Image: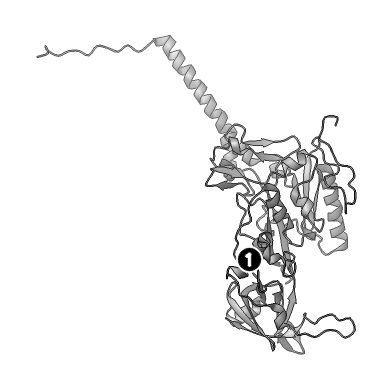
């Protein structure tokens, strides 16, 4: 399973989860899961899932989507899941205990491109399971 | 425009075009929403709440990017997200800004029985005047777009005002000011129609959206909020935008012929009663015949 991390248009890094207006737009972070994988694993939209990499675990609700499609690489079916990074240690929802305090960047490797020093957050291996 | 509002022509140190330039109360105003360049950031939703002074609310995760399932009395503006797979298996993620369309022939105004509760300005804005609203919600059933929302506590109906307060002062609506991609435009109806047509041409010639078109439904006399859609043949894909919206026939019959038939019947009734009075005079109450002597 390949995992990628990204930002949302509604949030700015880890700042705006302290701002009611942004929190209202996207109240909590989620894991975007392809429809095919979700039906294979029996995951419904809104179910809590646990994503584990070699470095850490991350829990959030599942968002089942058609926007991420399974890929066929070298004859094998490979799924990709997407993780918005904005969930973090403190924020309106975190402080209220409504969302777990798990951090996406703990999952991703601390590896950078030696030339440009761009971190490698866009493709790494994880395991996903129902939590 | 000697007596018109002051219009700002230039602003110092301001990035981008002057807000509200070329808007005037003497024109038919129009909001153009180019859904092909919307990124779903919902900045317009926040701008709308802030300008109208409504509170932020607690929302819940619902397996979608959409803030809430539907508009609310204090939430005039909502981006609707829809994933659509066409017959060839191509996926498109459609985002549409949903708010009052400000119809030229507004069903809400037709249906409203309260004096002065709904007004239509000469520039095309349809505005609710809550102090005159009696809370009957006929406007809700009169609207082909399902926009007006009822506040149960105050018993008043609210909807997008197209920021009539801002437009009246020569500014553009708050949502347009907030839009970061320039997918929202505001100006005279003619200008916006031209701009929309230009954009549609561009889409048809340079992209695969050969069905692109302008949504300005004639069934409600045209609207003062128009869309550029990827696929004009299927507006319902964009979160239930009706293809041929019309004022419901019940409202048309009731406020049209039925109203006059009712008035006529009432008039004829009065004439009938008067004629009867003149012809036969007042009804005489006959003394009840007494049977036998009272004991």
Residue located 85% across and 39% down the image:
B7
Residue located 81% across and 62% down the image:
B209
Q: Against B109, is B184 above or below?
A: below
| Mark 1 surroundings within 10 Å by alpha-carbon count, few (fewer than 14), some (14 through 19), many (20 or more) | some
- Most foreground residue, B57 or B195: B57
Give the image location of residue B51, x and y in percent.
71, 48
- Most foreground residue, B98 or B237: B98
Quadrant position of residue A11: bottom right
**Image quadrant containing the N terminus of chain A:** bottom right
- Most foreground residue, B122 or A10: A10
Residue located 75% across and 49% down the image:
B174
**Image quadrant containing the C terminus of chain A:** bottom right
- Most foreground residue, B205 or A112: A112
Chain of the residue displaying label 1: A
Give the image location of residue B289, x and y in percent.
20, 13
Q: Which residue is mark 1?
A: A92
Q: Against B172, is B113 above or below?
A: above
Give the image location of residue B264, x and y in percent.
54, 24
Lateral position of residue A130 relative to residue A83, left or right: left
């Amino acid at each position: 399973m390949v995992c990628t991390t990204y930002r949302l248009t509604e949030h700015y890094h880890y700042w705006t989860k302290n701002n009611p207006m942004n929190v209202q737009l996207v109240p909590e972070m989620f894991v975007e899961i392809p429809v095919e994988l979700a039906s294979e694993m029996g995951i419904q939209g809104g179910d809590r899932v646990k994503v584990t990499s070699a470095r850490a675990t991350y829990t959030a609700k599942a968002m089942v989507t058609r926007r991420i499609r399974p890929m066929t690489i070298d004859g094998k079916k490979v799924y990709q899941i997407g993780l918005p990074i904005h969930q973090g240690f403190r924020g309106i929802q975190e402080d209220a205990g409504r969302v777990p305090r798990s951090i996406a960047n703990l999952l991703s490797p601390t590896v950078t491109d030696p030339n440009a020093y761009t971190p490698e957050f866009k493709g790494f291996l994880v395991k996903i399971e129902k939590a | 425009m000697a007596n018109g509002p002051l219009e700002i022509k230039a602003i110092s140190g301001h990035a981008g075009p002057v807000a509200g330039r070329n808007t005037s109360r003497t024109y038919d105003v129009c909001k153009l929403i180019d859904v092909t360049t919307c990124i779903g950031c919902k900045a317009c939703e926040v701008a709308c709440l802030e300008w109208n002074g409504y509170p932020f609310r607690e929302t819940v995760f619902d397996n979608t990017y959409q803030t809430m399932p539907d508009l609310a009395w204090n939430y005039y503006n909502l981006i609707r997200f829809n994933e659509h797979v066409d017959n060839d298996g191509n996926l498109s993620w459609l985002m549409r800004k949903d708010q009052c369309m400000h119809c030229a022939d507004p069903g809400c105004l037709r249906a409203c029985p309260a004096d002065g509760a709904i007004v239509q300005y000469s520039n095309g804005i349809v505005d609710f005047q809550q102090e005159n609203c009696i809370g009957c919600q006929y406007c809700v059933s009169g609207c082909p777009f399902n926009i007006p929302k009822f506040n149960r506590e105050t018993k008043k109906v609210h909807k997008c005002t197209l920021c009539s307060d801002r437009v009246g002062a020569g500014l553009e609506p708050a949502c347009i000011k907030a839009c970061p991609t320039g997918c929202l435009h505001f100006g005279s109806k003619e200008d916006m129609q031209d701009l929309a047509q230009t954009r549609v041409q561009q889409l048809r010639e340079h992209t695969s959206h050969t069905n692109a078109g302008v949504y300005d439904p004639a069934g409600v006399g045209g609207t003062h909020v128009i869309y550029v859609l990827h696929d004009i043949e299927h507006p319902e894909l964009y979160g239930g935008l009706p293809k041929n919206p019309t004022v419901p026939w019940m409202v048309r019959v009731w406020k049209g012929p039925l109203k006059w038939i009712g008035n006529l019947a009432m008039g004829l009734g009065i004439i009938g009663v008067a004629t009867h009075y003149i012809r036969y005079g007042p009804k005489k109450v006959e003394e009840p015949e007494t049977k036998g002597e009272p004991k």
